Structures are given as structure tokens and as C-alpha cells.
Image (cartoon, coloured by chain):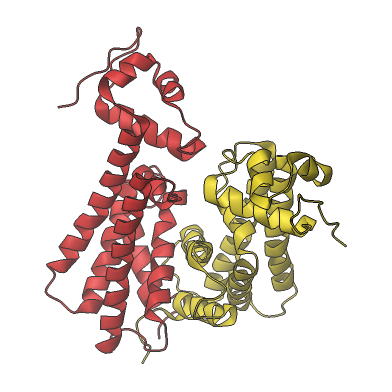
Chain colours: A red, B yellow
Amino acid sequence: MPEPVSGRGRPGYSREDILRAAVDAFNAAGYEATSMGALADRLGVTKSALYHHVSSKEELLDEALDRALDTLGGVIDEVGTCGGGDMERLRLLVRGTTLALCAEAPCVTLLLRLRGNSDVERRAMDRRREYTRTVVDLVSGAQADGDLRADVDPATVGRLLFGMVNSLVEWYRPDGHLSPAELAELTGKMAFGGLVPRS
Amino acid sequence: MPEPVSGRGRPGYSREDILRAAVDAFNAAGYEATSMGALADRLGVTKSALYHHVSSKEELLDEALDRALDTLGGVIDEVGTCGGGDMERLRLLVRGTTLALCAEAPCVTLLLRLRGNSDVERRAMDRRREYTRTVVDLVSGAQADGDLRADVDPATVGRLLFGMVNSLVEWYRPDGHLSPAELAELTGKMAFGGLVPRS
């Protein structure tokens, strides 16, 4: 249960509100360029009120990155329990990742923009690399099964595929004209079917 | 002809060397977080030697963004002179953009990470939006000609397509195992043909 932060005449903020405001600020101005003071100003609370709930800026970064990685990890786990072949798993991964990105776009944006400037960032980037390995393994497996074209390099396909899906964090808006489910259908159509009509 | 910067016992640097070092520093630590002093240290020259050649950090940002945008603008111009239909133009655009990104990866990385925090950044982002409009117009035109599947939203397809291509700046390495020409072939295959083999 999130505790409200006592502000100065402003309504109380939950820990969740603080995290969301921090992630928005980090994405807008950069993590390094955002101070706890600037974050307190943004929320309209005193810096000491903010420190009552959060011990450091890095704690907020760590929590936001964990959320992004746990959401993406949940998709990997779900795909792992699927009984189909690797192509079926790859389709589920593209679909699930699209939905996960729409659901947690701000935290995933932060994850994708990491530069590896601290231990927290490097740990998150290690987990991102595990994700990439899973994708590349599924592409190779689907090729071996004859379900995915043989004339492409699996590692590069994996990067391009998730480059496409990850771009969602740059332009997805919850009030846009396509729903997350419609976007998930579209990423699958483009990646697997291609843009040229199949006769 | 670039003029050498007189260093302290280090070999002279050309304006081009300074620009490349600045772009690498901006990409690694963020534009806001990189000072002219830090850049001088990186080059092993004094700050005053650096200011002899560059009037401000913003001048370097402006020049790097112009280079990225001019390279991408050159692709658009080339596509405009192509006599084929919109699908042919879209294929050329995907191919040409892939090659342009490989050739100017650091400057384009900088462009893609802009947050719109200054006039220079906002001007560059306006030019990026023109690019997106060109892509979306070509997707719509190719759909009207029956050359591109009709069951997809052109604006979203444009964003996903260039999300895929733009992801190159995150992972392309000049010494990687695929050449720019091979990558350009692969982005075209994936986007237009799709990953499922065509019978």
C-alpha cells in the first residue's frame, strides 16, 4: 500500500506517483541532469518530504529499471511455457513484448536509453543482453525447423526485429488511434508476413 | 582543408577529429553532461586551444545534427528522382537510409536521442518529422497501387519500419560481420518479404 507524501498544500503523492514523475523527468532531461531537488519541485513537495520516502535518485532508477526488466522477463517466462515450436514462441515473444512496451512505456524508455554509466545501469544492460540471446536462439531454432527464411543472419534479424518493436517507446501514446492489441497484431504482421501482399 | 589544433605535445587534431570526439562524448555521457573542458581533456588539448576552433558546444551539436540530417536528406532527394512507383521509392528509401545510418552512425545516434531541450534540437526534430511524413506518404501511395498490403495503418507502418532501420545506430559496428550493403539487403528482405518463407 503506497504511503502518501505530505506536500505543502498539494494533495499527497503515493510512492507510485513519485516513481512515475521521476521516470518522466529522467526521460525528458536525462538521469544525470535530473536532481532530487528538481524532482521535488516537479511534485510540488519539499526535498526533505521526498527524502522521507526515497533514499536516493539511484533507488528510483533501480526500481524503474527493475519494473521494465520484470515486465519483459514475464514475457520470456510465458513464452518458455508455450508448447509450440520456436516460430510459435518467437511470435508470442514479439506480441508479448509489444504489449509489455505499451503497458510500461516510460520505464522501458529509460531502460533502452541507458548508457552504462553506473553499476545499476550495467546490471540492467546485462539483463537486456540475456533477452537478446533468447530472441536470437528462437530465430535460429525457427530456421532449423524450416519455419523462418534461411537466408538471413539470426543475430541481426533478432536486433532488427526488436529494434522495430522497441521503437514503440519513442512514439506510442495511450490515447493514439491503435490499441496495444492492434499494435501487437501489426508488429506480428510486418515482421512475419512482410509488407508485400502474399498471393 | 581542416586546420590542426595545436595541442600540448599531442599530435594536432583537425576540425573533423574534434567533431567526431564531441559526438562520441555526447553519445556516451549525454550532451548536457559534456562540458567543453571535458571535451578538451578527451582530446588532450587545452580548453583555449579548443575554443580557438569552436565557439561553443552548441556549434558542435549543430554541425553534427546537420551532418546527420543532410545525409538523410540526400537519401530523400535521391528517392525523389526515381522514376518507379511508390513501392520502388520506399524500397530505395529503406535501403538508402540503412546505408546512410551505417556511414554516419554516431551523428544519427545523436539525432535520434534528441529531447528537444533547445532551439537547435527542436529545429533538427522538425526536419526529422518531414522525413517521417515522406515515409508515410510512400506507404499510402504503395497501398493505393496495390503493391503494399492494405490491412495496415500507413503512419504506424512508417514508424515501425524506420524504428527497425534506426535501431542500427544502437548496434551497428563497422567491423561487424555484415557489411552496410548486406545490412541494407537484410532490412529490405525483412520489411518487404517478412520472416516467414514465401512458397
Q: Residue at x 71, y 54 (%)?
A: B19
Q: Is residue A182 visible?
A: no
Q: Residue furthest top?
A: A9
Q: Residue furthest right?
A: B1
Pick whichever, A111 or B35, lies toward us: B35
Quarter placement of the C terminus of chain A: bottom left
Where residue A181 sits, quadrant-wise, is bottom left
Where residue A13 sits, quadrant-wise, is top left
Q: Residue at x 35, y 35 (%)?
A: A58
Q: Residue at x 32, y 83 (%)?
A: A148
Image spot of residue B61 (x, y percent): 69, 47
Question: Up-down: is B62 above or below A151?
Answer: above
Q: Is residue A17 visible?
A: yes
Image spot of residue B104 (x, y percent): 65, 64
Question: Up-down: is A94 above or below A37?
Answer: below
Q: Residue furthest front?
A: B9
Quarter placement of the N terminus of chain A: top left
Question: Up-down: is B8 above or below A81?
Answer: above
Image spot of residue A110 (x, y percent): 40, 45
Q: Residue at x 63, y 47 (%)?
A: B125
Q: Is B78 placed left or right of B151 in the picture?
A: right
Q: Is B73 placed left or right of B34 in the picture?
A: right
